[in-house]
Amino acid sequence: MSELRTTLVQCDLRWEDPATNCQRLAGQLEDIDASETDLIVLPEMFATGFTMNSREMAQSVDDSEPLAWMQSQARQRGCVVTGSLAIKEGETYFNRLIWARPDGSLAHYDKRHLFRMAGEHERYGMGNDRVIVELKGVRLLLTVCYDLRFPVWLRQQPRGDDHFEYDALLCVANWPAPRRHPWRTLLQARAIENLCYVIGVNRVGADAKGLNYAGDSMLIDYKGDPLIDEPCDSPFIKTGSLDRDGLDRFRDKFPAWMDADRFTLEV
């Protein structure tokens, strides 16, 4: 059986304090049995909170201490560690989802849909590329927070004889409590319409702007049923499994993909 063991890390964050956040997370991750997970998922901007101070907080890939910390954790635990950081590349700043492998190599996705209601589109550059990574035979589409509201960007876009582009959609977020119902609803909708697992990891606590975050981190199966769901505003660490064989069987039994509309996405 092909399983991807995935650990959701729902945590509080200290505002614009990367050293403290990484130190706290390192302590929390000690509770994870390194032999029992393949993937550790941290929230969006886990080192700083959802800051618009990109010029002050972003660092280059080579100089980013939080990124180096992610690589160290991945190497130490023998699994992939993912979460987003403010990253500077040239003269542009990105809200970048990092995929840190235990061998030290990296993949990344730059957030496409920037949250204009917070001015994110004025402080960060827009990503142009959809990114799919593979781990233990499971293909994952990488996304960040506000992306979740845009189903065309996230829709399966199969090519050739492969009926599915990815098997799981991963979304890291700083999604405020007043909009928790859309967060929960959209996570389940994306799973149902794409016949895939969905991994959604959000933060808890309050930020320096007075926004509260309710968490609601979830692991959802391809039918929209939650496998991990603790609707609480407290930190937690939970591990669940994505069963690729079960997913394949369901896709064969319920082949809604055969009636899906084909389209070309222009970016």
Image (tube, rainbow, N blue to C red):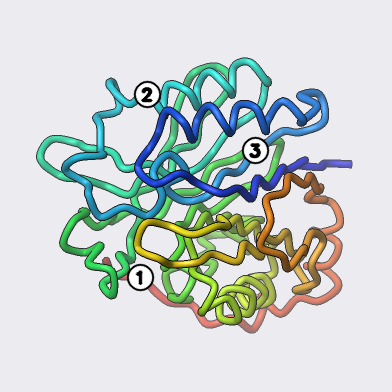
209 is higher (above) or lower (below) than 140: below
Name the residue: 42% across, 21% down. Answer: 68
Q: Nearer the viewer, mark 1 or mark 3?
A: 3
Which amino acid is tagged 3?
Ile
Q: Nearer the viewer, mark 2 or mark 3?
A: 2
Q: Which mark is residue 265?
A: 1
Q: Give the quadrant of the N terminus.
A: top right
The crowd level at tag 1 (other Cα within 10 Å; few <14, some 14-19, many 20+) is few
- Pick the front one: 250 or 187: 187
* Mark 2 / mark 3, whichever is N-terminal: 3
According to the image, label 2 marks what residue? 65
N-terminal-most mark, 1 or 3: 3
Q: Quick one: 85 or 47, which is closer to the camera?
A: 47
Residue 40 location, x and y as percent?
Answer: 64, 38
Q: Secondary structure at mark 2?
A: helix
Residue at (67% x, 20% y) in the render: 78
Decide if residue 30 is on the left or right side of residue 89.
right
Give the Cα separation between the discs numbered 2 and 3. 18 Å
Q: Position of residue 48 (x, y in %)?
A: 39, 43
Does residue 244 appear anywhere in the picture? Answer: no
Q: Are marks 1 and 2 in contact (CB under 8 Å)?
A: no
Q: Which residue is denoted by mark 3 in the rendering?
A: 40
Compute the Cα span from label 1 to label 3.
30 Å
Q: Amino acid at mark 1?
A: Leu
Q: Amino acid at mark 2?
A: Glu
